[in-house]
Image (cartoon, rainbow, N blue to C red):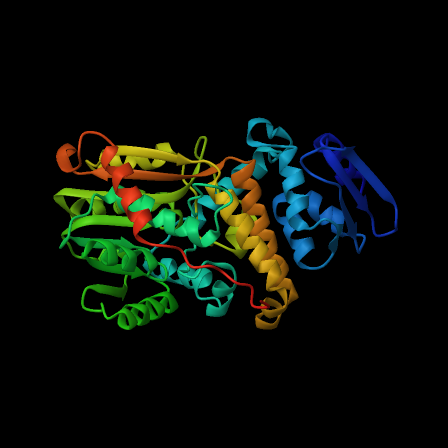
Amino acid sequence: MWLLDKMLRRLITRGELTVVDHDGKEYRYGAPDPIHGPVRVRFTDKGASSHIVRDPRVGAGEVFMDGRMIVEQGDIRELLLLMRYNAPVERNEALKTKGALRKTFNFLAARLDQINWRSRSRHNAEHTYNLTRRLYELFLDEDRQYTMAYFRDVRNSLEQAQLDKKAHVAAKLYLKPGMKVLDIGCGWGGLALYLHRHYDVDVLGIALAPDQIEFSRKRAAEAGVSDRVKFELMDYRDVEGPFDRIVNVGLIEHLGTPHYPGFFRKCHNLLKPDGVMVSHCCGRLGEPGVTDKWTRKYIFPGGYIPALSELVTEAEKNRLITADVEAMRYHYAHTLEEWYRRTVAHREEIVELYDERFYRMWLFYLAGSETAFRYGGMGNWQIQFLRRRDSVPMTRDYMFEEEARLRSAEEAPRWHLAAE
């Protein structure tokens, strides 16, 4: 415990943290803070603290998942927020990996994990998205948007924020009736159906998770638009064009940097000469980095969140004009907070679907992600790419006007707890 004690004394200066070791000895850190209340944790065995010290980014998650670290006051979200609050991206030296050898090993391991050839891409997608369908119904909005919501007001519901996100993205596509749209990484079909509903366009949605495609096809059939909105289990590398518009929301994070050149080259070739592509993805607010080991192991194998420079550089090489960039700094933090709240509300059902360890893993994933987007170096990018500079109007006024029109045209449903 002495090594962890040394680390925590250096790290925790704001907010109160109490750690109770397996033998009952208490360690106290920090001072009262108006933003984050006191948190108390207890280790259940002698090796828990040393497991954290050996590799903090993995160890903390694993001891929590295994029930070796119990949060007795507050919850895991409050603990992780308190930790990151004391080491925000602006001054996070305390969380940096020590040792040149370990840094090199982590970098190489993360880079190798991003080599997503076709079979591996499908395997990784199935690992992430083919969990029990009911799980996603419990914490996502009704439209199953498993990406950042757009909170025009933090008091808005998740349903409203996700509907506003679709309007925000659609307005940047500059769509006209009759256009052909490709939705790469279409999820459960919500955006594709939204674009057809509001613009009378033909949409091809593709993804690598069979359950997503099956569910999306069912939605299109129920809406009576299967002839106009089609969904295929397909790798983007196998798509044939051309398309007037390409949209991808939450797709680039799954590509891996070795595949950026091929992705942007393929998108350039799929677009018509006056085509427009809008990419929405999680992003690093600083320089390029690597995906942490815990996330690669348990949640998103093969995933990587890019820096803006990595995306723009590859777009330039493939003759795509970066016409508009928006940094979304806090929206995903609010989204993840709501996902966490809904997960907690459905604890019993999730434990029944899986087990207690999975439930704790999911909490740690959501809470840890929120800390990264609230205090860490993560945000979201929305980038508009053009093949030709005259493909959209000269000013951005069309975006604002169209987004306002879309918002006024549709009202979000209200979410209810199962117990209500």
Name the outermost residue toward the right: 24
* Residue in front for this viewpoint, 225 or 357: 225
| Residue 376 image position (x, y, % from top left) | 54, 36
Q: Where 44 sits versus 11, above or below?
A: below
* Residue in front for this viewpoint, 128 or 161: 161
Number of numbered discs on residues: 0
The image quadrant where one finds the C terminus is bottom right
* Residue in front for this viewpoint, 104 or 364: 364
Q: Residue at 23% of width from left, 63% of height from top?
A: 229
| Residue 195 image position (x, y, % from top left) | 26, 54
Query: In the drawing, does residue 346 fall left or right of residue 134?
Result: right
Name the outermost residue toward the front: 408
| Residue 282 image position (x, y, % from top left) | 42, 43
Q: Residue at 48% of width from left, 51% of height from top?
A: 157
Query: In the drawing, does residue 417 fall left or right of residue 120?
Result: right
Q: Residue at 54% of width from left, 40% of height from top?
A: 372
Q: Residue at 16% of width from left, 46% of height from top?
A: 269
